[in-house]
Image: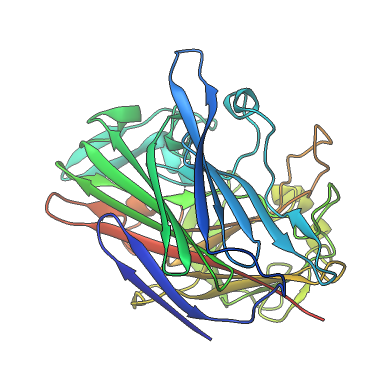
Amino acid sequence: MLVSAVRNLSVLVVVSVSIMISPIAYAEPTVVTAHYGKLASGEDVLEFTMRNSHGMQVKVIEYGATISELLTVDRSGKFAPVVLGAKSLDEYVQGFPAASVIGRYANRIRGASFNMDGKTISLPKNSGENHIHGGRKNFAKVVWKGLAAAGQGRCTVILRLTSPDGDEGFPGKLEVVTTYVLTDDNELAINYQARTDKATIVNLTNHAYFNLSGSDGDVLEHQLQIAADKYTVVDESLIPTGEIASLNDSPLDFRQPRRIGQRITELYEAARGYDHNYVLWRDSPPTEPRLAAKVVDPKSGRVMECFTTEPGVQLYTANGFNNNPYPKHGALCLETQHFPDSPNHPEFPSTSLKPGQAWNSTTVFRFSVQP
């Protein structure tokens, strides 16, 4: 299979060869724009509905650049949502576990601070004494501005956001573009791009919660494979110590496919489940997205492959879910990103961005069905 990404500052085109997952023939790919809701501030939020010629459907809303729905088919030809989605804008505002874009910095930063050009930058402490996911009003909690187009076998939604200098403590005015592309090869590609007017750090991801069964059950029977033989060792705060260790047949080892639930209880004392960063590369950035992980739901037959240009992928198994409204481990996240706390570890791939540079990252989720 081939994945090839062609990128510029506003458009991502994905060319791919893969197995189609539905024999149903629909019209050409379409994108429909509609009003989704209004915030208490009076700000309107639009929704974009993309559908390819095989019936796969993805909805994106401007609030948080969020994937609000992703419908794909099972082995019997039945479509069902495989990403957790809320029923209203208010639910997202109230903290529904959303498939939103996380920034400026996905994951954790120790002590909520880092050094840049000899100056200590202080960030909000929103995870104990540490910083997580860009702060209290991060990119998942603001309205992006979107536009959409369809043609040539794909649907595209482009969302833009300007983060002002000092936003949540981060230096520099940051111009961000997130582009979603749904192809007729049943791929959803996400491209992130950013530019700054002052030295800063950037680490963007999408925090989508996947459940390939299309139900409200857990994902413990899902089969998972991750293309990594190392991980970043963490302390009791789940922040890297700086050590990169081999998996060595530990509960974290998914080099060969196995059930997510097979050894998850061995991690309950430390992290209540999986919440770990896997090392995909350290010194050789790929020019095109590489396979990072593959998930199979034996019950429905749905298969999801994740490709990325990012050096890491954080596996999270919804350890904090408590049946309100989803059960513990009711979903899994594959957060493609740079390593947690990278600004405080110069030996990690850098997350720094300076004026005149363009930050670029691509992740592709490919869906298919096994017999």
Q: Is any part of residue 276 visible from this angle?
A: no
Q: x, y percentage for residue 208?
A: 60, 50
Residue closer to the observer: 242 or 101: 101
- How far from the left and from the top, in percent, is residue 210? 68, 54
In the image, farthest residue toward the bottom? 1
Q: Residue at x 80, y 34 (%)?
A: 325
Tally the marks.
Answer: 0
In this orientation, which residue lies closer to the viewer: 123 or 13?
Answer: 13
- Looking at the rendered image, the quarter that the C terminus falls into is bottom right
Placement of 246 over or under 73, stated as above or below: below
Pick the front one: 41 or 169? 41
**Residue 149 is at least partly visible in this image:** yes
Q: Is residue 38 left or right of residue 160?
A: right
Nearest to the observer: residue 208 or residue 32: 32
Q: Tell me: residue 196, above or below residue 293.
A: above
Q: Residue at x 69, y 49 (%)?
A: 271
| x then y, percent, for residue 333 | 63, 54
Q: Is residue 345 left or right of residue 213?
A: left
Image check: 150 left or right of 354?
Answer: right
Question: Which residue lies most toward the left here?
Answer: 356
| Image coords of residue 315 (percent x, y) | 62, 59
Rendering colour mode: rainbow
Q: Residue at x 85, y 64 (%)?
A: 221
Picture quadrant of residue 138: top left
